[in-house]
Image: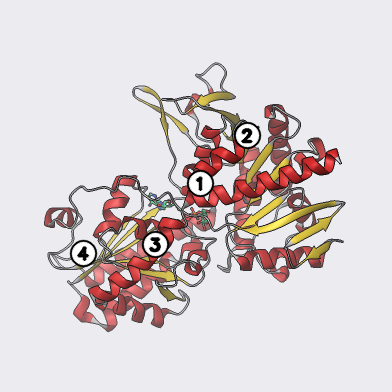
Amino acid sequence: RTLIGQELAGSDVIIVSNREPYIHSAGPDGIRCAIPAGGLVSALEPIARGCGGTWIAHGSGSADRETVDDQDRIQVPPDNPSYALRRVWLSPEEEKGYYLGFANEGLWPLCHNAFVRPIFREDDWNHYKTVNARFADAVIEEARTEAPIVIVQDYHFSLLPRMIRERLPNATIVTFWHIPWPNAEVFGICPHATEILDGMLGSDIIGFQVPLFRINFVECIDRTLESRINHENWSVRYGGKTSQVRTYPISIAWPDQPLRTAISSPTAREALGIKPGAKLILAVGRLDYTKGIPEFLQAFEDLLTQHPEHCGRVHLYYVAAPSRGEVTSYRTLHKDCLRISQAINDRFGTEDYKPLLFADRHADRDELSRLYREADVCVVPSLHDGMNLVAKEFVAEREDEQGVLILSRFAGAIQELPEALAVNPFDLSKLTATLRAALKMPRTEQTERMRRMRETVRSKNIYRWAGRLLEDAAHVRARNQLLRRG
Ligand code: ADQ
């Protein structure tokens, strides 16, 4: 936190993301302001607060559009206004084309090995370009100096860095890509591959979660653009400008005040429908086809089929937050998950035993925290995942140094958490065997593994992520200033 303050005090900092750091919704008592779930806001908020910067986001779901006078730009957070939130309002067509279409039906499946075919529609691409240009206008309007630091978040804005660079050549632009970057062969199927790479190279720094994504990105540049790549320091010289390609594994805030409310109490377990003495397997995630939900449900069913001694002794609690419901593949997934869950309960359930609790809803932080602490095993079966914060959240909550983490080999988090039980979620029989091993793991072994994972997550927390990113931005900015003077 200190590092962020030192490096950027008084700087003109602009953060751009698709989602807002605060969501305004209409309630019986008027407009309510809530913080969306996820690590992004907790990572970037201290930066925005610390330097009184500006956060630009799509005003999606904001109920105050019609009710607040100067609704484009408001001061947040409501209880202690310390930075500006500038909303870009999109028309329903723009939102459909840019967000649901190009970003989520095109780039999202392109970047994840989940074998869902990306859809590239010309119309969606045109909206994506228009919306990126509208965000560029907002950045230019919000910049207080001719050399702001602009931090661009994710695959919704691959064209934005170039658009900003053309109008603010002295800006320091950092782009962080939260999801995987595919290999050159896969990326090459995108009809707009060249424009996307050119757009991203408007950045001074491009950040990825893990080294493999950076390798893939640089390979794509090598195959697509006339450029000079320095493999020693991971920089790309293109169009007379140098971009650094770096890795910054994202993380979570280490809980300052862990919840100490009743956990492991028989009543808390009973309220969840857990039989006395039974073990609890937990999975948490967005309802997304990259998260391996049906795959894991199948593994759980196989466990009960092949090892019936677990019937009545093990429950699976899946908290899956509905997501992108406007996209057909997500609606189909949601229905499939409900159907599979019902079938498992019909097959193995009895009057006093419900093996699977499938909660298709968003849980609040306190509830998640309790579940993490209650679980004997937490499973992250992602088919492909940039990082995965659920794995780190589970570890952070386990002050008791107990609990087993089963983590996909295809989630970025596995690189920092080798003490987890690594699985290939496509390999069902191994997944089932790992689940059995996790349920049997001795407490001493759980402690050994959990202790190490906790050390990692505590030290490599979100403030370190933000601090490293900003420290690099500050160095680039200082060097560019010197070059301009010289
Ligand atoms: P996501 O794909 O959303 O993020 P993840 O990293 O797991 O995936 O973060 C999800 C967040 O939402 C977590 O904080 C989790 O607690 C919360 N969440 C999930 N399900 C929930 C539920 N049912 N109720 C309440 N909260 C829930 C993208 C990339 C990831 C990358 C992050 C951050 O896909 O790979 O780790 O960005 O860079």
First in sequence: mark 3 vs mark 4? 4
Q: Secondary structure at mark 4?
A: loop
Q: Amino acid at mark 1?
A: Leu
Quarter location, residue 8: top right
Contact flag, marks 2 and 4 (Cβ < 8 Å): no
Pointer 1 residue? 40
Q: How many marks?
A: 4
Which of the numbered marks, if any, corresponds to residue 90? 2
Foreground mark, 1 or 3? 3
Observer able to see residue 287: no
Distance of mark 3 from mark 2, alpha carbons? Answer: 43 Å
Contact flag, marks 3 and 2 (Cβ < 8 Å): no
Q: Is mark 2 within 8 Å of ligand 1?
A: no
Expressed as whole percent of the image width and height from the top left, the position of residue 242 reads 80, 53
Q: Secondary structure at mark 2?
A: loop
Q: Amino acid at mark 4?
A: Lys
- Which quarter of the image is occupied by the C terminus? top right
Foreground mark, 2 or 1? 1
Foreground mark, 3 or 4? 3
Q: Is mark 1 within 8 Å of ligand 1?
A: yes
Pointer 3 residue? 455
Q: Nearer the viewer, residue 91 or 483?
A: 483
Foreground mark, 1 or 4? 1
Contact flag, marks 1 and 4 (Cβ < 8 Å): no
Expressed as whole percent of the image width and height from the top left, the position of residue 24 reads 46, 30
Distance of mark 2 from mark 4, alpha carbons? Answer: 44 Å
